[in-house]
């Protein structure tokens, strides 16, 4: 009975030993000196001298592992700043940088960013638009002339023609031609003028006349024909002349009508004044006035 108990305890001890051997060994921890050598100190503040408005303060720190100490400066709260100095100029898209130096006690600098300028475009015409062709304008950044872009200018869409003028006058049986030009471009347009009608002439009397019949006892005189000028259709010049005369007479009548109206009004006014004066004389005579 005792032998079986010893055997069971031996088996349990062997199993426990085998389990411990199978477990992974814990990683070896680096020594504190190795951490300090690698720059991983564990500092603790051991002493502090607060800064005042006019004087800097100090804060002392010591490493808990190796005992290394260092001192940090606490700048005075009332800074004595100098002028800002630009270290890097800003561009249209990139910010710049500037700094200033405090000369109070322990000199130190303060840095600040300068905002990017952004693009400032100026417009200029590279090509004027035509009647049917678009133009082009260019936008150039005033801060960075290398940065540009273009944009189209819409075309006018149609020509701006002047008045028609006659280049070749029309004649009888021959067409003429008139033209007009665009005031914005060199485009030129022409059209024909209708030919003037041909003048018609009446046929004259025949050169030969019939002889009187032999049996006639009395000679008869040939019929008398009246010579009339051939009928002619009015030309463009005649129409223009008649129109000019009509316009001239109309303008002259337009001036004469107000003149005669004024004369009639003056005559009527003078007659009314004469009647008024005569009536006054009669009234004065009745009242005994001389």
Image: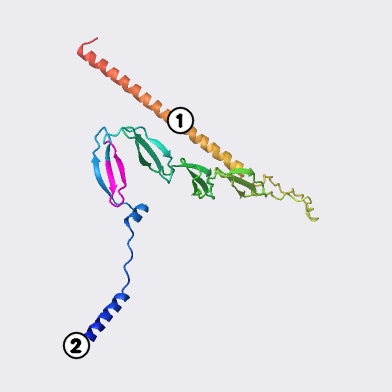
Dominant SS type (magenta) = strand
How many marks the image carries: the answer is 2
Quadrant for the C terminus in the image: top left
With respect to residue 137, does 215 lie above or below?
Answer: below
Q: Position of residue 180 (x, y in %)?
A: 58, 45
The residue at the point 61 percent across, 41 percent down is 237
Q: Do the residues labelled 1 and 2 touch (CB within 8 Å)?
A: no
Q: How is the image coloured?
A: rainbow
Q: Is residue 76 left or right of residue 203?
A: left
**Residue where numbered disc 2 is placed:** 2
Can the viewer see residue 153 in this picture? no
Q: Position of residue 145 (x, y in %)?
A: 50, 42
| Residue farthest left in this picture | 1
Secondary structure of the residue carrying tag 1 is helix
The residue at the point 43 percent across, 31 percent down is 257
Can the viewer see residue 5 in this picture? yes
Quadrant for the N terminus in the image: bottom left
| Residue farthest top in this picture | 290
Give the mark nearer the N terminus: 1 vs 2: 2
Magenta span of residues? 59-76
Q: Nearer the viewer, mark 1 or mark 2?
A: 2
Is residue 265 one of those drawn in magenta?
A: no
The residue at the point 49 percent across, 36 percent down is 250
Q: Quadrant of residue 77?
A: top left
Toward the viewer: 121 or 231? Answer: 121
**Residue where numbered disc 1 is placed:** 256
Q: Position of residue 45 (x, y in %)?
A: 25, 46
The residue at the point 31 percent across, 44 percent down is 70
Q: Position of residue 146 (x, y in %)?
A: 51, 44
**Pointer 2 local density, CA inside 10 Å: few below 14, some 14–19, many at least 20:** few
Secondary structure of the residue carrying tag 2 is helix
């Amino acid at each position: 009975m005792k032998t079986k108990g010893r055997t069971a305890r031996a088996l349990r001890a062997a199993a426990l030993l085998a389990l411990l051997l199978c477990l992974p060994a814990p990683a070896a921890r680096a020594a504190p000196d190795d951490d300090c050598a690698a720059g991983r100190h564990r500092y603790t503040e051991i002493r502090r001298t607060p800064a005042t408005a006019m004087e800097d303060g100090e804060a002392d720190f010591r490493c808990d592992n190796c005992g290394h100490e260092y001192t940090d400066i606490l700048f005075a709260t009332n800074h004595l700043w100098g002028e800002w100095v630009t270290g890097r100029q800003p561009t249209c898209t990139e910010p710049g940088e500037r700094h200033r130096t405090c000369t109070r006690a322990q000199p130190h600098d303060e840095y600040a960013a300068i905002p990017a300028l952004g693009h400032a475009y100026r417009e200029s015409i590279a090509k004027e638009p035509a009647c049917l062709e678009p133009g082009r304008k260019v936008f150039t950044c005033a801060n960075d002339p290398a940065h540009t872009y273009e944009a189209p200018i819409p075309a006018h869409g149609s020509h701006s023609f002047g008045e028609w003028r006659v280049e070749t006058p029309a004649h009888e049986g021959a067409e003429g031609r008139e033209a007009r030009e665009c005031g914005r471009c060199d485009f030129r347009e022409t059209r024909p003028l209708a030919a003037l009608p041909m003048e018609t002439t009446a046929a004259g009397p025949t050169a030969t006349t019939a002889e009187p019949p032999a049996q006639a006892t009395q000679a008869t005189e040939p019929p008398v024909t009246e010579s009339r000028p051939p009928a002619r259709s009015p030309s463009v010049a005649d129409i223009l002349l008649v129109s000019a005369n009509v316009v001239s007479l109309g303008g002259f009548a337009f001036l004469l009508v107000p003149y005669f109206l004024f004369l009639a009004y003056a005559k009527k006014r003078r007659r009314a004044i004469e009647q008024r004066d005569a009536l006054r004389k009669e009234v004065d005579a009745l009242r005994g006035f001389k």
